[in-house]
Each structure stands twice: as C-alpha cells, then as structure tokens.
Image (tube, rainbow, N blue to C red):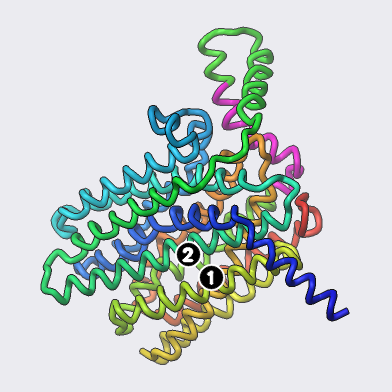
Amino acid sequence: MSEIQKTSWLESLSVYKDIRMLRILLLGSISGFPWVLIASSLSLWLKEEGLSRSTIGWAGLIFAVYAFNYLWAPLVDRIQIPFLTKKLGHRRGWIVLMQIIILLSLLVWSVINPSQNLALLISVGLIIAIASATQDITVDALRIEQIKENEGKSMAAGAAMAVVGWWTGYKLGGVVALFTAEFFENLGIVDYWQTTFLVLGILIILMNIGLLFVHEPIETDRQNKQKETDKLIEEKLGSNNAITNFIAYITGTIGGPIISFFKKNGFAIAAGILGFVFLFKVGEAFMGRMSIVFYKEIGFSKGQIAIYSKGLGWITTVVFTLLGGIMAMRAGTIKTMFFAGGLMAVTNLLFAVLAWTGKSEILFAIAVIADDITAAFATVAFVAFISLLVDRTYTATQYALLASIGTAGRTTLASSSGALVDWLNGDWGTFFVLTTIMVIPSLVCLWLIKNKIKIGAK
C-alpha cells in the first residue's frame, strides 16, 4: 500500500518535467511583474512621499481594470496587431505590444514628482494596469491552450507553474525594485524611485526576449465556431446588414461565453460559482493592499521587507505552490480551496499578533512564510478551478470573465482598506481580525455548490 502511495506521488511530480511547464512559468512571470510596479513599488513610493494611507488605498482603484478586462477580451481574441502578429503570432504579438506600453509608462514615471503631479502619476499607473490586464487575457489563453482539454493533471500542474511564475515575477521583481531603490537612496539620489523604474524597464526587455521561446498554441477552430455563433444570431435577427452584423458580433462575442457558462452549469450553480469567485480572496486582498504600509509603519526597512516579504517569500511560494499543485491533482481543487480558506483565516490572525506585540523579525518571518504558504495553496487551486470551467471555444474571453469577477472582489472592495485602517485609528490588530472574518462568506458559497459543480476533478 505504501509503495502504491509513493509511486503515485512520483507520478504527480513527473508532470512538472514537461517542457510546456517552463513556458508557462515564463508566462506567469510576465503576468506578475507589472504588479511590482502598481502594487508594492507605487504604494511605498507614495508612502515615502508623505501621502496618507487613505490616498494610497484609493490609488489602488486602478486595479479595478482587471475586473473589467473581460469586456475587451473578445477583441484580443479577434484583432490582429499589424506587423507583430505576422512576426510573432497572435498571442505573442498582443503580449509584446502591452509590454511596450508598460515600458513607455515607466519612462514617464521616471520624470514625475508624485507630490506635484499625483493625478498624472495615477493616470500613468492606470495605463500600466490596463496594459497589464489586457496582457493577462492573452497570457492566460496562451497558458491554457498549451495543454489539451483531456489532460486534467497537466492542467493542475500548469496552474501551479503559472502561479509560481506569477509570484516569481512579483516577488523577485519586488526584491530588485526594493534593493535598487534603497541602493540609489543610500547614494544620495533624491529621485531614487524614478531611477529605479528605469532599471525595472530593463527587466521588461529581458522578459520579451524570453517570450520568443514560448511557442504559439496548437491551431484551433475557435474563430470558426465564434463566426458560426455570429451567423446564428444574424439569422435570428432576420436580416443581413452592417447594423445586424455589428449586433451579432457584440452579442456573439460577449454574450456567447456567458450563455455557454450558464447553460453548462445551470443558473443556481453558476450563480454560486460566481459568488464564490467574487468573494474568495477578498480578505487576503484587504490585507495585501495595506501590508507594505503596515511593515513600514511598524518599523521595518526596505531591505528587511525585501528579504522577508519578497526574497524568503518567493522561495516559500515556489515550494508550496508546487505542493499545492500536487494536492490539487490528488485531492481535487475544491478540497484544496477549503484547506486554503482555513489557512487564510489563521494567517491573518498571525499579522494581528504581530501588530499587537510590536516589531519582531522572528514573528514577521513566521507571518510572512505562513501568508505565502496560504497564497500558494489558494491561488493554484483557484487558477486550476477556473481553468477547468472554461469552454475552449471561448478560452480567453470566458477565463477573463471568471478571473475578472475574482479580481472585482479583491480590487473594488479592498480599495477601502486604507480608509478602514484610518477609521480604526491605526488599530492594525483589529484590521487583521476583520480580514480573517472576510474569508467565511466565500467558503459558505463553495460548500453549498461543492457537489454539483461540473468539472473534471473536484
């Protein structure tokens, strides 16, 4: 019996040897890196410029664009980029275009004074967020299309590698950003953050070079099926002209994925899935939005934050994301999400203890490690879950819809995190307790639908 168990674990680990996993790893890194810019770097930049917690929290509303990228996902699926599509392929062409926009935005940031040009700074941050959200549409589609529909274990492993890649781009990118900023600050450079963004631009260039080694997906009949849907809608409209063609296009590309999703699951189950997706990581987002501000206020330096929160956190995240992928393969995504939800609640309480006891490097390290373990399990299960739900006819659009709904909960609600801390008069301990309570509603939604969800492995 023990030998069978051992072999099964080895078989699960062997899935990660697939060359496609390395490509997915790079795609994840490309997706995660922009969050270094508009999350931790922007928040700390504004904090060190003397802006209030509320301002920093509300600045996070730029993340709301991730909640709406579904609206233009059909355009990303259909529109070809002049020159880039022909040279690089449809998916890679879109990614490179968005990377160029992010790079140009960093150049603008490098000459902005936040206290004098806050509106411009946030506007450029919004452009980065839009480019990143658009990029995610095609990155996720490219990732899913690397794996065949009947490869359930490979999909779970691919989800794990995508998460590892995302956290690699975010964590290691954050290490580079924080240490670079501290280095320039120690040199006496006044605009050390602006100079740091120029260095981060170099990383974007390197990632685009790496993108050349990611193959375009196997050809599919996705566009033909979408055109068939358009034609059926045109026939229902009873005429064929420019207006009806446009209506058919909009209805088919935006309404088609929604109709397909509700038809597959039934209205009640589909609504339960959407409720769970919306609420699952709200508590984590509330905590994450204010975490770097909390670290700074409690007395940790940029170097300490980089070591514990970014460097050590990256190692922990990589290891436990891979383990989370194996757990999702063996126990199923739903059980993994229940497990991750419980971990979220416990982890947030650790930060409450840190807030109440004061600065402690040991407790800080324990809390950060626990948080990264939690994020690893939660994210890989979540990504695998919605990847298994999508219809390959609408890969980019339907995945973007589900991911957008999840992002909506994290961004729109969590944008009030700074205001909540201010309302609590800086009582960080109570704030973290409240984020613990926020975990419960999503798990209730999942419990109600857990036996009725139509996916390959629960």
**Which quadrant of the rendered structure holds the C terminus?**
bottom right
Res 383 quadrant in image: bottom right
Amino acid type, residue under disc 2 in the picture: Trp
Look at the numbered disc 2 and give the secondary structure of its residue: helix
Give the residue at mark 2: 167
Of residues 361 and 214, the one nearer the viewer is 214
Q: Residues within 10 Å of mark 1 (few under 14, many from 20)?
A: many
Say whether residue 371 is left or right of residue 357: right
State whether the magenta stretch is mostly helix, strand or loop.
helix
**Mark 2 near mark 1, Cβ–Cβ under 8 Å?**
yes
| Residue 58 seen by the camera | no
**Which quadrant of the rendered structure holds the N terminus?**
bottom right
Look at the numbered disc 1 and give the secondary structure of its residue: helix
Q: Height in image: 315 above or below 116? A: below
Q: Residue at x 53, y 43 (%)?
A: 215
Residue 336 within the magenta-colored segment of the rendering? no
Q: Residue at x 46, y 49 (%)?
A: 66
Q: Residue at x 46, y 40 (%)?
A: 92
Q: Which residues are magenta?
A: 249-270
| Residue 115 seen by the camera | yes
Of residues 202 and 271, the one nearer the viewer is 202
Q: Position of residue 269 (x, y in %)?
A: 74, 49
Amino acid type, residue under disc 1 in the picture: Val
Q: Which mark is residue 318?
A: 1
Label 2, label 1: how far apart the Cα atoms are: 8 Å
Q: Height in image: 303 above or below 328? A: below
Say whether residue 347 is left or right of residue 221: left
Q: Position of residue 163 (x, y in %)?
A: 54, 61
Q: Residues within 10 Å of mark 2 (few under 14, many from 20)?
A: many
Res 206 quadrant in image: bottom left
Q: Position of residue 393 (x, y in %)?
A: 66, 34
Q: Position of residue 191 (x, y in %)?
A: 14, 64
